[in-house]
Every structure is written in structure tokens, then in C-alpha cells.
Amino acid sequence: MRNSVLLLFVFIFIACSTHPYKSTNKVYKQKVKAYAKEIAALPKENPFSDSALLPQYWVGTTNFNLRKPTFVIIHHTAQNSCDQTLKTFTLPRTSVSAHYVICKSGVLHHMLNDYLRAWHGGVGKWGNQTDINSVSIGIELDNNGFEPFDSLQINSLLSLLDRLKKQYAIPSANFIGHGDIAPTRKNDPNYRFPWKLLAEKGFGLWYDENREPVPANFNHIQALRIIGYDVKDTSAAIQSFKRHFLQDTTKRINDLDKSVLNNLQKKYY
Ligand SMILES: [Zn+2]
């Protein structure tokens, strides 16, 4: 008995001392401490311009908490393994990160506290949101960009989304993909991603099977804008919409697309 306890301690010791990300976890802690210090400090300099009345002194309110994320952005990693992605997100020179990484096996890695800002969205726009990283949680799915998504991975994602939606009261419409917010630059998650299944579980919106006729004066660009797409490059926006809602990677709009768009836009009012 005593031997087995000893063995267990030796095992834990070895497991801890060989943690492959021990040193980057240390960097994470140092960074969090530095940010906490920054937030806790009382402002010293008066930041107001000449035209504003100067405040006499800083009055710290007693009533506040941390801001919550209101969007979830789903990605595929476009890399060849989970380990490769973990490595990428722990090298300072890459300047990219996400809150969560889910492997094909369904194993979930939490890489950043949900309240902190990860660097996953890049330049993107959704509706009037232009700083997606500030308002969102980024989830990366291990996938080289061409593969289907394994059910183990999707099940793990669904449990995570369930927790995030409840914890932060994230609206159903705000579960979207990287390709949705950056139509000219990104195509992730790839067209095989099961958005319909997600929508059925309350993560994202979906259109009706039985749809009303499309009015003669229907404006598909306006409909794309209502949903949230950046329509500066219209064919990129159409392609993005088709990838998400029709599992179609083409750029040209057809009657089916118009019917879906017409139906869908009303759900975003
Ligand atoms: Zn992405």
C-alpha cells in the first residue's frame, strides 16, 4: 500500500515536471498579473482635453464587474494537429491565439480566461461590430481546412457552447464563424461544418424549410447586411453566406439562395 502511494507521488511529480507547456504557463501568469496591476492602479494623469471640465479627483465607483463576451467565433485551425496549434498559440512571434482549442478526439484545451481578449478574429466586421476580438470568445477546431468534422469533436464543442451560452447569456444569433466576419480573407470553419445542427441546439439561427415567395423587389445585398455580413465586397459576402447556410462554396447567387436569405433576414430583425 505504502509503495503504491509512493509510486503515485513519483508519477505526479514526473507528470508535473514534464508538463510540455510549463514555461508558457508561467508567461501567462506573469502577463495576467501585469494586466491586473494596470487595472487596479488609480489614474494619475488627467486624460481630458482643454475643452472638458477637469475632474477634481478620481472617484472610484463601488459597483462594477468584468465585461462579458457576447459573441462566439468558430474557426478551423488549418493546421495538421492539435499539438501544432497549441505550439503556435504559445509562441509570442505568431501573435495569434484563441480561448479554446478542440482536438479531433474531442479533447478540449482552455488557453485563455474567457474575460480576456484573444487574438483570433483579425480584421473583421459583423453588423456594426468592428473589434470582434474585444467582444468574443474564439474557439479553434483542429481541422486542416478540408476535412469533415468528427462527431467527437462536435459533441465536445456543443457542451462547451452550452456552458458559454448559459454563463454569459450569449444570444443565439451571435454564434458565427470566422469566415462570416472576414468574408474576403477567411473561409473557416470549412463548408462541411454542421451549422444546421448547431442552430437546432440554439447556437446560431437557421431558415425555415417551408418558405414564403420571394418578393419581386427583394434586395439580397440589403438582406446580407441585415444578417450581419460586411457587404463591401458583395461576391465575397455571398460566398460566405452560402458556405455557412447552404454548404456551397460558389460565389454566384441563385433563386434558392435568395429564398433562404429572404426568410433568414427576418429572424435577425
Ligand atoms: Zn480562423
Image (spheres, rainbow, N blue to C red):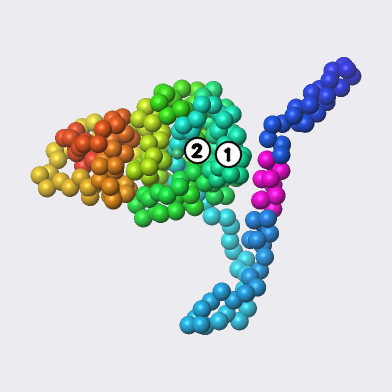
Seen from the viewer's position, the closer of residues 259 and 126 is 126
36 displayed left or right of 101: right
Respond yes or no on whether mark 2 lies under 8 Å from ligand 1: no
Residue 264 visible in image: no
Type of residue at label 2? Ile
Q: Quadrant of residue 248?
A: top left
Front: mark 1 or 2: 1
Taking 61 as reference, is 123 above or below it?
above
**Dominant secondary structure of the residues highlighted in magenta in the image:** helix
Looking at the image, tell me whether mark 1 or mark 2 is earlier in sequence order.
1
74 displayed left or right of 67: left
Determine which residue is flagged by label 2: 139
Whether pointer 1 and pointer 2 mark residues with C-beta atoms closer than 8 Å, the reply is no
Residue occupying image coordinates x 79% and y 26%: 14
Could you say which disc has been placed on residue 89 in the image? 1
The range drawn in magenta is 24-33
Seen from the viewer's position, the closer of residues 261 and 163 is 261
Spot occupied by residue 254 in the image (x, y as percentages of width and height):
18, 35
Spot occupied by residue 155 in the image (x, y as percentages of width and height):
48, 26
